[in-house]
Image (cartoon, rainbow, N blue to C red):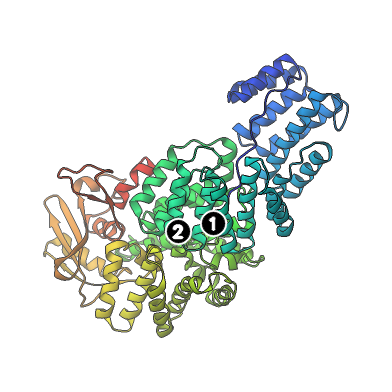
């Protein structure tokens, strides 16, 4: 999750009898969760009497809570308040029931403004409430103040309210103090407040446990992040606006636990969310799916979904991050997926004759155009405040270090080199640890600029010091180090690094656009010979004497391609059958068998296997089963990738 989340609210209110009988019936439907009925009843009342404040409120709440139409809800909520105060004695109303309703409507209005990220308006409404009613709702001022960067004011309120006798207020205060220090970029202080809040709430608050998990990730304690998210799943207070499965999917992916990440996303899909929250973080959840698809080599599926994120980004109302922060994070994810798609189209074009490659070259050019436009957006955003610095500092935004190396290509080596140095100077609490991640990013930068000795030293140092839990980043650095050694003519020294990559995450070779040195052998069949000739032109292959071998051969009903290592070790294989050639979901219509085999080699053999344990999938002999990534993902997508 990109930033700490706000505690859910507001709490339920008891019905206060006021307004016409039909409007009260609409209110009962609303509070019973019968939103369609409530809307119908409220609209019928307003057709007869447009001045009914209660029916206007019900309709506003339906737009807000059920339909996520926040702009319309805001108009109607304000109209409801004006109707109430106009009919019952001004501000505050003289009628006691009307005063209770006025308090309720102000509370709903400030919450609605918060979800719209209109923070000064939210503060104004809270001030209006506190000018007329007691007790004051100071705790609700913390979040808008921190969003406005008024940290000291927010801290003062939080430090007072953690001593409150009200459990809900204490929870909000602790959560607010965590978020304040997170946005002030104080890793340790945010984590420490999380520990105190977790202890104070006895581990029974979902939002505190979930945000503590995020704070643990910020301080590079991935095992704790996993543990606290799992504890958050067991809470029953309903304070989390998004299920902790969303964060667990991220942590598992960081750790290279593909199956657990897929399982967390599958569970996340099962959990319904109200319409107003879908507006807030639907694309954040989709972003977790994009990252998983991307990591597993399903880049066309990732592209479809990341375009949806760019077209309809989340509002920033429910997180402590700014809208610009979300935009820049989305832009880098889009850049990463587009670049990988361009690499994929280059692979397909390279194994085809000139005429047959035209469509793929055109697609690549179209993707490059979209990437160019995206880079213009990213460059404009990166000039705003500390957005880029926050993104380069590890684990401070929604951008994960296993793909943040894409910043160099997106924004240029000179700018990123400068920001890396600035980031090194901005880690007062964890400077030693944070530098390991910054070394990894700089290693990639130096590698891309052909400064191989410096790149090698940085990569080797990063691998010696990065925690084992940060598995995907380590594998990215490992792939870069392997390529450096290959370019330096030290293939034997590179061999164990290639082995680690091919065993766990071969997709990274496409992500960074690096070739794999292989020898190519075949069984002398016509289909295998043609596939071998074509595959030798792939940018993902460097044909040379190598401990790694691609074997191509004919089968009874098609052909197969296998990637093998020293001693006959087999990393992965793919078969293309006549049945596959007839299925456009697997092989594009009209693709000859040799070309289909080359494409499947890139998309399947150079993608990780996902292990499903016995509890996930029952095999005939009880052993763990390893599936290709596309098969494992069918449960999330609900379709063939």
Name the residue located 25 percent from the left edge and 43 percent from the top edge: 617
Name the residue located 61 percent from the left edge and 37 percent from the top edge: 68
Of residue 176 and residue 617, the one placed in the foreground of this image is: 176
| Residue on which disc 1 sits | 330
Crowding at dot 1, Cα within 10 Å, few <14 / some 14-19 / many 20+, comes out as many
Q: Is residue 444 left or right of residue 159?
A: left
Name the residue located 70 percent from the left edge and 58 percent from the top edge: 151
Q: Is residue 609 left or right of residue 260?
A: left
Residue 18 higher or lower than 105, as above or below = above
Task: State the image quarter where residue 87 is shown.
Answer: top right
Estimate the spatial distance between the alpha carbons at disc 2 and disc 1, rounded to whole Å. 11 Å
Of residue 149 and residue 366, the one placed in the foreground of this image is: 149
Task: State the image quarter where residue 125 is shown.
Answer: top right
Residue 299 higher or lower than 234, as above or below = below
Residue 97: horizontal and vertical position, in percent? 79, 23
Q: Earlier in the sequence, mark 2 or mark 1?
A: 1
Residue 58: horizontal and vertical position, in percent? 69, 26
Q: Which mark is residue 441?
A: none
Residue 635: horizontal and vertical position, in percent? 35, 42
Q: Is residue 292 left or right of residue 398?
A: left
| Residue on which disc 2 sits | 337
Of residue 406 and residue 251, the one placed in the foreground of this image is: 251
Residue 186: horizontal and vertical position, in percent? 60, 64
Residue 209 in view here: yes
User: Which is closer to the viewer, label 2 or label 1?
Assistant: 1
| Extreme-top residue of the structure | 21
Of residue 543 and residue 629, the one placed in the foreground of this image is: 629
Crowding at dot 2, Cα within 10 Å, few <14 / some 14-19 / many 20+, comes out as many
Residue 542 in view here: no
Q: Secondary structure at mark 2?
A: helix
Q: Secondary structure at mark 1?
A: helix
């Amino acid at each position: 999750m990109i930033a700490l989340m706000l505690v859910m609210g507001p709490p339920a209110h008891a019905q206060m009898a006021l307004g016409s009988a039909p409007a009260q019936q609409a209110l009962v439907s609303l509070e019973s969760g019968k939103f369609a009925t409530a809307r119908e009843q409220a609209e019928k009342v307003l057709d007869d009497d447009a001045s009914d404040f209660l029916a206007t409120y019900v309709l506003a709440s339906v737009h807000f809570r059920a339909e996520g139409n926040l702009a319309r809800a805001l108009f109607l909520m304000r109209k409801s308040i004006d109707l109430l105060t106009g009919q019952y004695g001004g501000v505050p109303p003289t009628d006691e029931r009307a005063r209770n309703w006025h308090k309720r409507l102000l509370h709903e209005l400030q919450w609605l403004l918060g979800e719209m990220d209109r923070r000064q308006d939210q503060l104004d409404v809270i001030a209006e409430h506190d000018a007329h009613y007691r007790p004051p709702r100071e705790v609700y001022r913390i979040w808008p103040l921190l969003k406005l960067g008024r940290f000291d004011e927010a801290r003062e309120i939080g430090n007072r309210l953690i001593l409150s006798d009200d459990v809900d207020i204490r929870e909000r205060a602790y959560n607010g103090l965590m978020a304040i220090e997170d946005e002030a970029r104080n890793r340790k202080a945010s984590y420490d407040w999380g520990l105190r809040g977790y202890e104070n709430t006895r581990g029974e608050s979902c939002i505190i446990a979930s945000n503590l998990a995020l704070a643990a990730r910020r301080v590079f304690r991935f095992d704790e992040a996993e543990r606290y998210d799992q504890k958050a799943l067991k809470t029953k207070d309903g304070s989390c606006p998004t299920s902790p499965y969303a964060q667990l999917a991220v942590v598992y992916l960081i750790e290279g636990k593909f199956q657990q990440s897929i399982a967390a996303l599958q569970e996340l899909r099962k959990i319904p969310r109200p319409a107003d929250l879908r507006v807030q973080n639907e694309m954040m959840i989709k972003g977790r799916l994009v990252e998983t698809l991307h990591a597993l080599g399903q880049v066309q599926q990732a592209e479809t979904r990341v375009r949806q994120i760019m077209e309809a980004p989340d509002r920033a109302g429910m997180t402590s991050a700014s809208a610009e922060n979300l935009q820049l994070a989305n832009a880098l994810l889009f850049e990463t997926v587009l670049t990988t798609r361009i690499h994929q189209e280059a692979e397909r074009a390279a194994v085809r004759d000139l005429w047959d490659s035209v469509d793929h070259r055109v697609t690549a050019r179209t993707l490059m155009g979209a990437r160019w436009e995206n880079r213009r957006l990213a460059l404009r955003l990166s000039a705003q405040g500390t957005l880029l610095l926050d993104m380069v500092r590890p684990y401070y935004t929604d951008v994960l270090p296993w793909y943040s190396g894409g910043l160099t290509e997106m924004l240029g080596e000179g700018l990123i080199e400068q920001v890396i140095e600035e980031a090194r100077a901005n880690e007062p609490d964890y400077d030693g640890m944070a530098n390991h991640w910054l070394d990894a990013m700089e290693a990639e930068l130096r590698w891309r600029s052909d400064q191989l000795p410096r790149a090698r030293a940085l990569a080797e140092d990063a691998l010696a010091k990065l925690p084992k839990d940060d598995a995907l980043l380590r594998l990215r650095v490992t792939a870069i180090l392997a390529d450096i050694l290959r370019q330096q003519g030290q293939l034997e020294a590179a061999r164990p690094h290639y082995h680690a990559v091919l065993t766990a995450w071969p997709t990274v070779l496409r992500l960074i656009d690096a070739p794999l040195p292989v020898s190519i052998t075949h069984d002398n069949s016509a289909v295998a010979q043609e596939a071998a000739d074509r595959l030798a032109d792939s940018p993902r292959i460097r044909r040379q004497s190598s401990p790694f071998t691609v074997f191509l051969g004919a089968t009874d009903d098609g052909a197969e391609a296998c990637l093998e290592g020293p001693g006959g070790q087999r990393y992965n294989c793919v078969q293309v059958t006549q049945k596959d050639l007839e299925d456009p979901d697997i092989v594009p219509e009209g693709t000859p068998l040799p070309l289909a085999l080359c494409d499947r080699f890139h998309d399947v053999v150079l993608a990780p296997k996902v292990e499903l344990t016995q509890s996930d999938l029952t095999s005939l002999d009880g052993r763990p089963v390893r599936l290709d990534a596309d098969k494992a993902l069918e449960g999330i997508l609900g379709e063939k990738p």
